[in-house]
Amino acid sequence: MAPPCGGVTLAGCDLTGADLRAADLTGARFGRVLTGAPPHGLTNATDLKLDRAVLRDLQLEEVIGWPITG
């Protein structure tokens, strides 16, 4: 099991296809960089792998491609 991320902030990251399975993302924040106007500076989570990841208190702000639906 991956160590906890401890409230990490990921802003303006390209996480396309990243493997975060079983990661502890408790308190993590996925957001954007203040670049002026969207879509610049957004975090891309397209095809992000999150099987068995801990998403407690995860914060999302203008994330594109977020894999969770429903």
Image: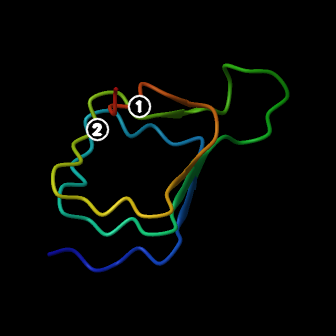
Amino acid type of the residue tagged 2 in the rendering: Leu
Q: Please state the horizontal and vertical placement of residue 6, each as a whole percent of the image.
A: 47, 78
Q: Please state the horizontal and vertical placement of residue 43, each as a whole percent of the image.
A: 54, 36
Q: What SS does tag 1 mark?
A: loop
Colour scheme of the rendered structure? rainbow
The single residue placed furthest to the right in the displayed view is: 36
Identify which residue is drawn at 63% across, 32% down.
62
**CB under 8 Å between callouts 1 and 2?**
yes
Q: Please state the horizontal and vertical placement of residue 64, each as a whole percent of the image.
A: 50, 26
Q: CA distance from mark 1 to mark 2?
A: 8 Å
> Which quadrant of the view contains residue 55?
bottom left
> Is 5 or 69 nearer to us in this picture?
69
- Vertical side of 47 occupied by 56: above or below: below
Q: Which mark is residue 48?
A: 2
> Is 50 or 56 nearer to us in this picture?
56
Q: Please state the horizontal and vertical placement of residue 8, each as a whole percent of the image.
A: 52, 68
Identify which residue is drawn at 25% across, 35% down.
17
> Which quadrant of the view contains residue 18?
top left
Q: What SS does tag 2 mark?
A: loop
Identify which residue is drawn at 14% across, 75% down.
1
How would you rate the neighbour count of disc 1 (Cα within 10 Å): few for under 14, some for 14-19, many for 20 or more?
some
- Kindly identify which residue carries mark 1: 66
Indicate which disc, 1 or 2, sits on the residue closer to the N terminus: 2
